[in-house]
Amino acid sequence: MNTAALREQIQRARQHEAETGQLRHSLETRLPHLHPAIAVPDNDAHAVLKNFVTAYIEHVPDLLDAAHSVAIEAGIEDRIKPVLRIASQFFSSPPAIMQGHEGLAGLLDEAYLAHRLVEEVNDLYIRHLGQPLIPSDSTVANVIAHQLIGESFANQLDQAVHLALSEMLDEDSFAQESVQAYRERLSNPGTEAAWRRWPCLSMQLGVGLELDGLQA
């Protein structure tokens, strides 16, 4: 999996942010309207959110590299490659609804698409096979990113994810004779050990959810 182009794209976006402060201004505008369940330190909220967004974006190529390496090691590359290709294309060729978005603020949208794709694929694999395809838990981070992007547009991005999945995976995908053998490889201890060597979004980014606030 060649993620060098994605990393160069992220680096250009970071330079754009250094020159324009576009993401910082966007976060300043959105911060007062975030759901109270999103817990951000009061003393430096803007910096914490900016660091969160940057880490969330930069995690995408790390996740794709990790997934590809584990897929090869576990013998499941044929199953995982379509997912990685679509996630990568969300960066390199984003949907038309994202035209005009640039810098880190724009890449937040694209990173959200990639992370949500992985999350939805994992849900499908858990339902059909009892194991996630890519055991990276980004659920909380995706909820926070959804809020930072804004409810209306984030919902449009969710629809783009659902459309991509409908063209890639259907019920027949899980009804093949090879599924049982694949399930066994997916739950192999070697696969689990390989994943532990790679980063995931369980890292502490300084932003979390307070469940009591989420239920309010």
Image: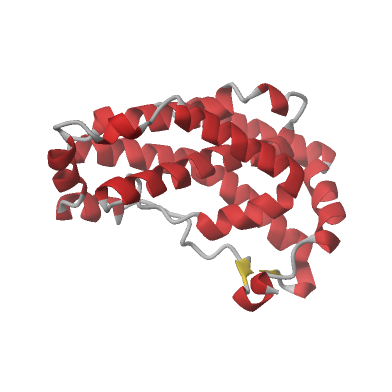
Note whether 40 is above or below 198 in the view shown. Answer: below
In the rendered structure, the answer to whether residue 190 lies left or right of residue 214 reads left
Count of all numbered marks drawn on residues in the image: 0
- On the image, the x and y values in percent for residue 17 come to 76, 40
Tell whether 16 sits left or right of 94: right
Q: Position of residue 23 (x, y in %)?
A: 78, 45
Q: Position of residue 167 (x, y in %)?
A: 45, 24
Quadrant in which the N terminus is drawn: top left
Work out which quarter of the rendered image holds the C terminus and state it: bottom right
Q: Residue furthest bottom?
A: 212
Nearest the eye: 162 or 60: 162
How is this picture coloured? secondary structure
Q: Position of residue 70 (x, y in %)?
A: 27, 42
Q: Residue 12's quadrant in the figure?
A: top right
Nearer the observer, 188 or 58: 188
The residue located at (25%, 48%) in the rendering is 129
Residue drawn 71% across the image and 35% down it? 106
Taking the spot 32% from the left edge, 35% from the top edge, the residue there is: 68
Q: Residue at x 85, y 55 (%)?
A: 28
Residue 62 is drawn in which quadrant?
A: top left
Residue 150 appears in the rendering: no
Q: Tell me if 124 is positioned left or right of 191 in this view.
A: right
| Residue 216 at least partly seen | yes
